[in-house]
Amino acid sequence: MEMKVILKTIPSRFDLNYDETFTSETNMEIRRNLVPELLDALKPNFHPTREQLTKWLNSLHKSRRSRISYGKKEGRKDTDDRRLHANGRMGDV
């Protein structure tokens, strides 16, 4: 949770490109600069490894990319949010 808050406060030049894959050249360059920033921001409370941060970023990128691509494809992302949430929660039971 804290990492999401930190990501919101980091400058927009560190935003990953969700139109491209996580391992694209553009996103790799952004990550080279973003990971050290995140390590410094998390240091007082947490001491994650670079590998952990990369896995967290990969998970966030995958989630946001699929949500954005679904919205572009269907054109009705906002109206389907509740249904998508409910369907996703059914798998948790």
Image: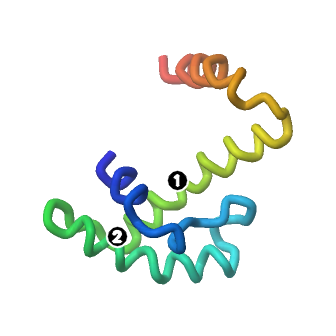
Q: Secondary structure at mark 1?
A: helix
Q: Is residue 49 left or right of residue 77?
A: left
C-alpha gap between disc 1 and disc 2: 15 Å
Residue 33 position within the rendered picture, expressed as x and y whole percent measured from the top left = 46, 81
Nearer to the camera, 5 or 87:
5
Of residues 56 and 13, the one drawn nearer to the viewer in this rendering: 13
The numbered disc on residue 59 is 1
Question: Callout 2: helix, strand or loop?
Answer: helix
Residue found at x 30% / y 73%: 39
Residue assigned mark 2: 38
Which comes sooner in the sequence, label 1 or label 2? 2
Answer with left or right where residue 2 lies relative to residue 85: left
Q: Residue at x 58, y 17 (%)?
A: 86
Residue 48, quarter of picture: bottom left
At horizontal 54% and vertical 60% (from top left) the residue drawn is 58
Colouring scheme applied when the structure was drawn: rainbow
Is residue 32 positioned above or below 64 on the image?
Answer: below
In the image shown, does 24 or 72 lie closer to the viewer? 72
Residue 57: horizontal and vertical position, in percent? 49, 61
What amino acid type is highlighted by mark number 1? Ser
Amino acid type at mark 2: Leu
Q: Quadrant of the N terminus?
A: top left
